[in-house]
């Protein structure tokens, strides 16, 4: 769909509902073409305005969540001013990193008084890494990836791996975005519907635990599960009431049968492994060099943006992020001693993560740590889903889960079968037949969740 068709000008001025779509990292408005066209096919121009954000496209997405959100907010405000008083409702949809940009943007809109005049209706994310993309796996390879990956995407990379210190808060931006006393959570709580869609497997850009805002992953081995689907959306959308149950444990195969099966499986993968041994070093070198160039360019854009030289109007978005002065003071020291590096895949009840949190409960700084999760609460959280192991997330990530879950979400889990990388398929990011399963996801969203 041509972006001009989505313009708020023309006959659609009669509509009283504006819906904004925000794409992800390295993205562009074309990635959201199927979402936009599906919205338009269901809701005519006299029912719904559609704005596909475009000012934060391509490598501009390297520049940080807040920078992208300020660009997008300026687009939204320009659109709202052009439309005048006809708009009475607002919805915002974020894909991948766009969901985090959207969460920041609604905080800016809230602080500038827009939600006093306009009703927030639908807030939806598709495959958004709400907890960042830090890998909760054990071993040196995971620590290496967490260290290396965070430094290849400029400011956005540091933020996604939660190694940044955001402005004067002294905390990662993702933690600030989930602070109950922040303008971002206040804004999010005003939306009538808060919905997320998360791939259960094969999302290599934004894994299940972060897109579903959870600390377990039952879907590591689907062969051990009986999966239940919503009847009209089978076999794609899992039934939220009872998405999965464990299969009865089967007797193990004989030893020599297991050896034979493993040998056959390894032999079948040899051509793939050989190809990867050739392509991965070449691809990694090209990716690293390009990331370095783009990070350098991004740092220049960020400096211009911060100085107000990139374009006009962004300085007006530099507003207090926390609602109360007490909340700001509490934030200053809340996360100074958090251990962000985990050396294990899962946590046990006597893990170092929980023990260290319990020790901090007796700290003389406890009065300044009200936003911090306590050891006792961490134990209660990690005992709720005892059927599945607890991922070795950081305390920051556990805190984000608690705070975001308290806001309340309708969570839909997505099982895409036909592609090896489901991140693009969930929104039908391009017109590939292999992405057709994503059309079921979009149909569910429009038929069951999106309120006009």
Image: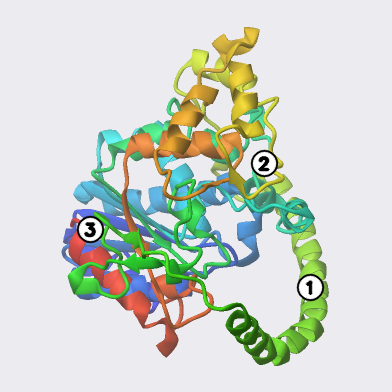
Residue 10 x/y as whole percent: 25, 68
Describe residue 248's horizontal placement relative to residue 311 as left or right.
left
Q: Of the residues under marks 3 and 2, which one precedes in the sequence?
A: 2
In the image, is residue 57 above or below residue 192?
below
Callout 3 environment at 10 Å: few (<14), some (14 to 19), or many (20+)?
Answer: some
Q: Which residue is mark 1?
A: 284
Q: Is residue 135 visible?
A: yes
CB-based contact (under 8 Å), mark 3 and mark 2: no
- Separation (CA) of disc 3 from disc 2: 38 Å
Residue 376 x/y as whole percent: 49, 23
Question: Which circle marks residue 219 in the picture?
Answer: none
Query: Which element is circle 3 on?
Result: helix
Q: Which residue is mark 3?
A: 449
Residue at 61%, 77% in the rendered image: 255
Q: Of the residues under marks 1 and 3, which one precedes in the sequence?
A: 1
Residue 275 x/y as whole percent: 75, 88
Q: Tell which of 224 and 315 is nearer to you.
A: 224
How was the colour assigned to the protein in this rendering? rainbow
Which quadrant would the N terminus be assigned to in this image? bottom left
- Separation (CA) of disc 1 from disc 2: 32 Å
Q: Which residue is mark 2?
A: 306
Front tag of 1 and 2: 1
Q: Is residue 112 visible?
A: no
């Amino acid at each position: 769909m041509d972006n001009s068709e989505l313009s708020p000008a023309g006959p659609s001025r009669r509509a009283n509902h504006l819906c904004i779509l925000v794409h992800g990292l390295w993205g562009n408005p074309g990635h959201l073409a199927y979402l936009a066209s599906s919205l338009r096919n269901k809701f005519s121009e006299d029912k719904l305005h559609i704005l596909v954000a475009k000012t934060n496209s391509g490598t501009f997405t390297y520049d940080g969540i807040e920078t992208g959100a300020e660009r997008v907010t300026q687009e939204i405000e320009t659109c709202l001013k052009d439309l005048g008083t006809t708009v009475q409702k607002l919805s915002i949809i974020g894909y991948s990193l766009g969901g985090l940009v959207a969460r920041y943007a609604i905080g800016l809109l809230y602080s500038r008084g827009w939600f006093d005049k306009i009703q927030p209706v639908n807030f939806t994310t598709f495959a958004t890494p709400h907890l960042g993309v830090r890998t909760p796996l054990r071993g040196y390879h995971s620590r290496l990836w967490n260290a290396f990956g965070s430094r290849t995407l400029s400011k956005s990379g540091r933020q996604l791996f939660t190694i940044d210190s955001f402005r004067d808060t002294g905390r990662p931006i993702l933690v600030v975005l989930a602070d109950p006393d922040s303008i971002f959570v206040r804004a999010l709580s005003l939306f009538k519907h808060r919905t997320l869609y998360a791939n259960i497997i094969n999302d290599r850009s934004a894994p299940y635990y972060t897109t579903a805002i959870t600390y377990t992953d039952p879907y590591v081995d689907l062969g051990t599960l009986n999966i239940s689907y919503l009847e009209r959306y089978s076999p794609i959308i899992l039934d939220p009431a009872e998405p999965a149950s464990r299969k009865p444990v089967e007797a193990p195969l004989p030893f020599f049968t297991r050896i034979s099966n493993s040998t056959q499986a390894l032999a079948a993968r040899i051509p793939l492994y050989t190809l990867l041994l050739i392509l991965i070093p070449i691809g990694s070198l090209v990716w690293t060099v390009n990331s370095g160039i783009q990070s350098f360019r991004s740092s220049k854009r960020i400096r211009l943006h911060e100085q107000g030289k990139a374009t006009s109007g962004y300085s007006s978005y530099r507003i207090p992020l926390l609602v109360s002065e007490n909340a700001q003071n509490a934030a200053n020291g809340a996360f100074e001693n958090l251990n962000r590096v985990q050396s294990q895949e899962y946590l046990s009840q006597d893990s170092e993560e929980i023990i260290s949190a319990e020790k901090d409960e007796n700290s003389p700084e406890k009065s300044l740590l009200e936003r911090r999760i306590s050891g006792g609460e961490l134990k209660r959280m990690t005992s709720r889903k005892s059927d599945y192991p607890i991922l070795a997330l950081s305390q920051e990530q556990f805190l984000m889960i608690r705070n975001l879950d308290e806001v309340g979400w309708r969570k839909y889990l997505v099982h895409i079968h036909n592609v090896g990388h489901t991140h693009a398929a969930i929104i039908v990011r391009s017109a590939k037949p292999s992405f057709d399963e994503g059309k079921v996801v979009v149909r569910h969203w429009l038929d069951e969740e999106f309120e006009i």
